[in-house]
Amino acid sequence: MSNFILCEYQTLNTPTMNFTKLCYVIVTFFLVSSCTQDTVFPEGGTLTIEFDNHISTIDDLELNTSVLNTLSGEHVSISELKYIISDVVLYDAQGNVYVYPRNESYFVINESIEASKKIVFENLPKVRIQKIGFKIGFVDKNQLENEGLVTVAEKEGLVSRKDQVFKGFSIKGDYLFEGDNKQYNLYTNGNNNSSEDEVKEIVVNFPTPLMIKDTDSNHIRVLAKVNKVFDSANAINLKDFVDKSESEKNILLLENICNMFSVLN
């Protein structure tokens, strides 16, 4: 049983750190060191977060069936989609930040496993929540000491300690361009010590604030538009993407991934 911890800093809207942006880089030690560990809230309500992967705003993602037509003129199908959600935080209307215990705040979302797309948080403070933040991936190998995460992530093919592979986001499938059908395998890969460029925190606003009540009826749906992976901040041409460096691939993918998510409640 876990409690959220209140972070007692009030820098949410400074010129250098604007938390209303959908995506920004956060240095892990800043968040951790800014929390007052003694300020722990009693048991409260639960919150179910459902990750709903779509190929557009209205169309569900169907593995091996859905086809995306990208701005680069490629026709893309998806056979696999997996990503790690970590370091979940909640923001209330007064700018307070509630941090879920990090050693319990890791989840693998796998499109082919329905149960993996629903996450339940317990013992939430009874406050009015205005937005949610989470990371895609993990900052460094020290966070992998959570053996529960490592076991699941290795089983899903996202982590290989032997080969020094630490994927935060992975998408695979086929694409057709000018009659030529090929396979693609895109992923973000943080090594033993991922940098700020390799792990992003995504913050999304609720359409309307959600009051956490002492019931199990609190529910939000996070819409993940997978088409944004290919066309958003950057137009990704799969034919040429393979020639880019690993660092450049990471940056381009993460910039696009940051535009995937919105909240429906």
Image: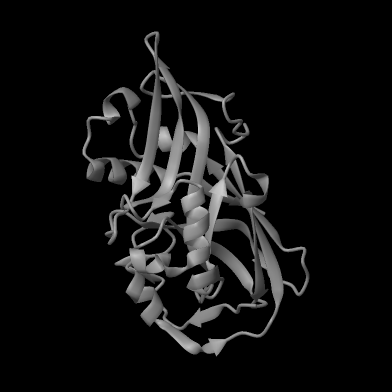
State the scheme by which the image is colored: one colour
Frontmost residue, 154 versus 216: 154
Look at the image and tell me whether residue 183 can be seen: yes
185 relative to 199, above or below: above
- The one nearer the camera, 13 or 238, is 238
> On screen, 223 above or below 96?
above
| Residue at horizontal 45 percent and vertical 23 percent from the top | 174
Seen at 43% across and 21% down, the residue is 175
Residue at the (58%, 65%) spot, across then down: 130
The image position of residue 187, as x and y in percent, is 38, 42
Front one among 238 and 222: 238
**Residue at far front of view:** 162
Across and down, in percent, residue 66 comes to 57, 25
User: Left or right of 185: which side holds 251?
Assistant: left
Quick one: quadrant of the C terminus? bottom right
Q: Residue 110, how many percent across, how many down?
A: 56, 45
Query: Extreme top residue here?
Result: 179
Q: Is residue 177 above or below residue 68?
A: above
Please give the count of numbered marks on the rendered protein: 0
Figure check: 6 above or below 12: below
- Which x, y percent locates residue 256? 39, 42
